[in-house]
Image: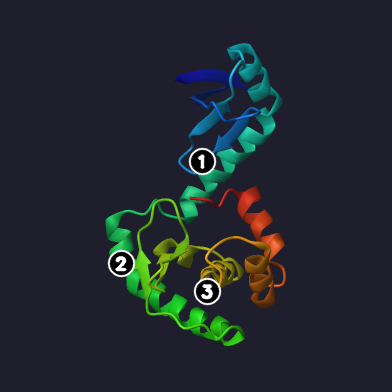
Amino acid sequence: MIKSIILKDKRINYKIRKSKRAKRLRLAVYCDGSVIVTQPRNISLNRIEYFIKVKSKWILNKLDFFNNLKRRIPKGNYEDYIKNKERALNQINIRAKELNKTYGYKFNKINIKNQKTRWGSCSIKRNLNFNYRLIYLPNRIIDYVVVHELCHLKEFNHSKRFWSLVEKGIPDYKDIKKEFKNKGLYL
């Protein structure tokens, strides 16, 4: 169900996603500018609107951030992907080899993709996949994504052991994770 609300003289459209499992209201703002409210059972529309108004500053900041980010990071169209795929492969190959000196893991190959929802992934076949749009991000964030995927070669989960491995290569990984969250760098 799509609704709209006025926040500081701006009309904001939002989608309500009902969830039987949700225990509390949840709000998400995505890089495409969509605003999603997850609604648990027995929560009224008035309560949802109040929740959105309380979070209005945060919502507007996220939307402004994403509008600015769109100017720096392209949406991921095919032409931009083809133009930058080789550059991304070269850059990530170099970083993966350098960062893997800490770990010494074996992987099959690195693939560069035009992914819509991920910066990177690791397959069971030990292939590392990366979003070509990483080249538009700062080097420390690229390194974090590369190390994150390298560590999945050893721990195919997000357990404490996994995060200990990440910390070995990126000691300030918690700060970078916060940056991902605060800057909304999730695709």
Q: Amino acid at mark 1?
A: Tyr
Image: 67 above or below 14 = below
**Residues under labels 3 and 2: Cα distance?**
26 Å
Judge by depth and name the residue closer to the eye, 168 or 82: 168
Q: Earlier in the sequence, mark 3 or mark 2?
A: 2
Find disc 3 in the rendering and name its residue. Answer: 150
Kind of residue indicated by mark 2: Lys
In front of the other: label 1 or label 2? 1
Closer-to-camera residue (47/30) = 47
Q: Position of residue 36 (x, y in %)?
A: 52, 31
Q: What residue is drawn where x is 62% and y is 32%? A: 26
Identity of the residue drawn at 64% across and 71% down: 166
- Do the numbered discs 3 and 1 sit on residues whose CB atoms are within 8 Å? no
The part of the image, by quadrant, that contains residue 163 is: bottom right
Q: Residue drawn at (32%, 62%), measured in percent from left and top?
A: 81
In the displayed structure, 139 sits above or below 59; it is below
Residue 83: numbered disc: 2
The answer to whether 7 appears left or right of 127 in the picture is right
Closest to the camera, between mark 3 and mark 1, is: 3
For marks 3 and 1, the one nearer the N-term is: 1
Give the amino acid type for the residue marked by disc 3 in the picture: Leu
- Residue 30 numbered tag: 1
Q: Is residue 87 left or right of residue 31?
A: left
